[in-house]
Image: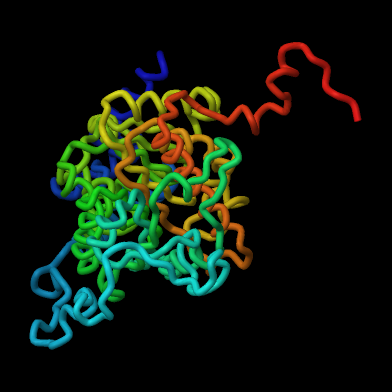
Amino acid sequence: MSAAAGIASLAIAQSTEKRFAPEIEAKLDKLTPEQAKFLRSKETDRFVSVEGELERRLAAKSPEEIQAYVAAMMEVIEASKFNPKTDMASIPLNPEAKSFNSWKVLRPAELDPKREPGPFSLSRYVEGRSGIPTFFGLPVALRPDDLTAGKVDIAMVGIPLNMGSGTRGAHLGPTAMRTVRMGAGNDMYTMTSPRAVLNMVDYGDVAVDNMSTERSMGHVREQVASIAKTGAIPFIVGGDHSLAYSDIAGVTDVLGKGKVSVIHFDSHYDAGRGRAHLIDHGQPVYRLIKEGHVAGRDYIQVGLRAQSPDIETFEWMREQGFRYHTMVEVEKSGWDVVVSRVLKEAKENGKRVFVSFDIDVLDPAYMVGTGTPVPDGLTMREVVPLIRRICAETDLAGFELVELDPTMDPTYRSAQNSAYIMHACMAGMAIRKKGITQEHYLSPLSSEWQKPAEKKGRQKPTT
């Protein structure tokens, strides 16, 4: 049997009713038809973690004990469901509160000293070595008219949201990225300075309701869309990965549904569904696909290796047309082969590309500062060239870096590596703006030590 046939047969087997050994079947006669149907369904899988464990438990029980055991499992399933008599379908709010929307009210320009629209510096020094920290030491913009007046290419924005995850430190990601104080200067690989080629600004932080991810989503989406409407590309620093929904939806609100491809770097697939909360950091992908913001065929995943998805979910991803590149594929085919596949898929339809980068795609040796680290991940040496190439060789629509939790990292390593990844994307965009179209462009000046004349046969001068 081929591998594909084996997977197909296993999936079919899982979708059919369970059958037990004859000695167990003989003890099921006391079950009601409803109980028997339940026992043979996949609902019982949640009660056992090891294959064959249910059979072992049933084999040790009498018919009466089996009936009681099945009834108890059914009771648990029923009690887990929503009960309109006892449960709240939504968290009640107080619409009479005078401060109901104060957390997201934008400051009118009339309340500030009068100034001409455009980016401005927060440093009192010419070289920008001190002052208030900003992303990559960039000037600041506060309103869309600043982005328009400055003809801004990249608007970096922090979104300190962490209510969509099980940990509570990702809200400090933007602060960590600003205080790492990495500049936007020369990229040795391309010998291009993003700061010299691109107009870039720190667009501040987007306000979030720290008691509600759901309330925050709408405002984040509006603010990302307001950046995209000016023609600037939103570069987002999170925050947890629930932001992928509002960030990508904000971009497609401007460019159009189905007009954007997503390259999603992650150790987790984040396409969970059916949970009590409609949005969290483990299921933004499903909501994006379900609402039509991104077509399944345009969703590309890189680096998956966590203990999910299961066979059923992999089949769902295939049905949607996902292109997923797991670490299993890397082990089987090699990183260079996978990189070629990812870039080919990213460029094949000519659509704008949004990069969603969860830092836990990297091995914890490089990114310990995240709430959900998974060993056996990618290295910085593997990720950085690919990010640079994606941003150079595709038409970028947006970039988000999420799940940076500096409370998990007592060193500067995670924030420094995160900044380096974003700088690689900036460098890619810079060479694209300069009109360099060569695939995997690397500067001859920094990649080859010989002078042009020496390469033609002249001996290297002695000292």
Q: Residue 174 versus residue 296: which sits nearer the camera?
A: 174
Considering every residue shown, the one lying at the far top of the view is 457
Q: Does residue 251 lie above or below 74 as drawn?
A: above
Left or right: where does residue 308 sit relative to residue 64? Answer: right
Q: Position of residue 346 (x, y in %)?
A: 35, 30
Image coordinates for residue 34, horizontal then vertical, percent: 14, 48
In depth, the one of 292 and 396 nearer the eye is: 396
Quarter occupied by the N terminus? top left
In this rendering, the count of numbered labels is 0
Give the quarter of the image for residue 410.
bottom right
Look at the image and tell me whether residue 68 can be seen.
Answer: no
Vertically, is 7 above or below 116? above
Quarter of the figure that contains the C terminus? top right
Q: Is residue 393 above or below residue 245?
A: above
Q: Position of residue 51 (x, y in %)?
A: 42, 41
Question: Which residue is depicted at the point 8% across and 86% down?
Answer: 96
Height in image: 299 above or below 33? above
Can see residue 395? yes
Residue visible at 12% across and 83% down?
94
Q: Kindly indicate the quadrant of the structure image that contains residue 393.
A: top left
Q: Among all residues in the image, which is located at the extreme right?
A: 463
* Whole-percent x, y for residue 131 in the image: 51, 74
Q: Is residue 453 left or right of residue 231?
A: right
